[in-house]
Amino acid sequence: MKKVTKIFAFTVAICILFSVTTTTTFAEETITNMTYDEWLAEQENNNTDTGKNDLEPVKVTTEENQIQTQSMEYTERVGFRSLDSIFEEKGEIELDDTVSMDNMAENLTDSISIDTEMERTAPTANLIPVIVNEDSLSEGQITTDTKIAFFYNDTDEDGDTIASRYADGSAVDYIIGTINGGFVVQNTDPGTYYLYYQVEDSAGEYSRVVGYSIKVIEAPAKEKYQAFEGSFTSENDSATYDFSIDFSQMDSAAVCLVRKGYVGTNIKVYDENGNQVLNKGTNYRQAKNWGYIDKPSDDVTVCNYTVVATPNSYEDRASDYRIIVGDKNDTELMMSGIENTVLLDQYYESKVNLQNNSYVPNVGEYWYKYKRNSTSVITILSSATDIRFKILNVDTLAVMYDSAKDDNTHKTSFTGSGGWCCAEKARLTTVVGTEYYLVVYCTNPTEGISLRTGSIATAVGNPVMCAASTKIIPGTSVTATGSGYSSTRTFSASGDDIPNTAQVRNIGLSGTGMSKIKRWRLMAPNKSVWVANESDFYPSINFNYVNDSSSNAKLKGTWSVAFQSSSSSYTFIPSYSVSYYYEYGD
């Protein structure tokens, strides 16, 4: 009988075959949160951007999800469990679906990679993954509803029988039971899982280990949404789609719009009589929008509609969009998930390109994709206290960082005087030039609501700045001289109420009539040059604050000051009114 592996001869190998003599793991890069001082040091050594940062919109295809097969030398079974012992716990299961070899995973999705040239020893461990319930796949991706049957296809060139089978890896916990000739796995949580498999023959010889990498996404909601995707090629481009709403299944329908690229979209929805019933749009700063179509009358069932999409402020960049139609109760879920990933531009204060969202994630997740630039500070401002974020590997969807596990990321002070009550703020040790998923989610979701009221604003790039002011009263007297500047005096700007990241715009002098002070000057804690008032008797000094600059005058620290009076020496107790910017979340 021909070996089953020959069936896979046409399969494109996605993984790199490797061989080691100890247990091998699928290593992931470790991401940590830098302190402010560590980040400043990084900026000194990393002061160049990666150039044009345009990303490709996320296309959910079979390549987003893989079962990868890898082979490795393995001489110890540390951590491996006998499959017999696992089956004693799980028992035998009866499947509702008929398992057919026509449903081998590689026939249904581009999800299997097996190297037919790998070295064979006796015995040889091999499993054939078969998708049990094909309808559980989502656009070719394995979901949390998918059952995978792994059938034994072990061989032994010496003719010895297979005496024992062993398994290890994170997928082992998701084995749901044994079937004739194999076992079934259902990964009920999204993520990337690993299954290592090894056999022992009757002569006591062990095979090399075969390892499977399984990427799993959350199963889409059972409700069936209508979705339309497209992009624009010019400012005059447009697209028309027809859809129906069965009002016997719902009282109100939601029409959702997602900007997946960088260019906004306008949509207008018309009923069968040509009447406009909805007009919504997205733009460069707002990537999602939605509207509702109520049931026209009590006796109506199916109604037909037409939606026309046009670009909003077209430019020659990715202009992908997604229109989703479904039950109003599922509004958030229709705009959630990897299929609704929004591309994030590098944030600059000068561009004011903060991404605003008019609802707060609840049962769903808000997905972004970004490229790590030289100053990729993550800032998420929120009107809710339970918003957190994860960083995912673009290739494997593995979670590389979760702000819920890092108390230093969640900020409740220095969030401005507006509607933000907290900020998720991180300076992560990600790799410059590398793409990542940023997934914003809620740690305490509330069921039963279509959208959670509130707002969030998201930026990855330069820090997001907030304007503030303070008054510093040193409480000591100084003497201004009439013949040039007085001797230098100092005062300190300190305390927990002053942000560490504060950068000065201007400082005004008070405590005396300016008719007595002709000139005065200040030297910031991080500067070695004086800055003086612009003209005689002018009460303030402008520090020429520049957006997105690391060279602005720092507020916190020891300041130097000197005065010149209009005539004779003059003694007074000065105070200083400071206008500054600081980073949200500090």
Image: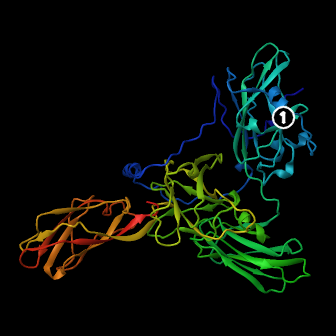
Q: What residue lies at 63% left-to-right and 68% top-to-bottom?
A: 319
Q: How many marks?
A: 1
Label 1: which secondary element? helix
Instruction: Name the spot of residue 203 as percent of width and height, x first.
Output: 80, 12
Q: Quadrant of residue 374?
A: bottom left
Instruction: Name the spot of residue 230 as percent of width and height, x first.
Output: 71, 67
Q: Is residue 211 left or right of residue 45?
A: right
Closer to us: 316 or 134 = 134
Q: Is residue 515 left or right of residue 348?
A: left
Using the image, determine if residue 85 lies above or below residue 517.
Answer: above
Closer to us: 364 or 497 = 497
Using the image, determine if residue 123 lies above or below residue 369.
Answer: above
Kindly identify which residue carries mark 1.
90
- Whether residue 118 is visible to the viewer of this picture, yes or no, is no
Using the image, determine if residue 288 lies above or below residue 95.
Answer: below
Q: Quadrant of residue 325?
A: bottom right
Q: Which quarter of the figure is the C terminus placed in?
A: bottom left
The residue type indicated by label 1 comes to Lys
Instruction: Name the spot of residue 546 as percent of width and height, x first.
Output: 36, 68
Instruction: Name the spot of residue 252 as percent of width and height, x first.
Output: 80, 75
Q: What residue lies at 45% left-to-right and 49% top-to-bottom?
A: 34
Q: What residue lies at 91% left-to-right and 32% top-to-bottom?
A: 180
Q: Which quarter of the figure is the N terminus placed in?
A: top right
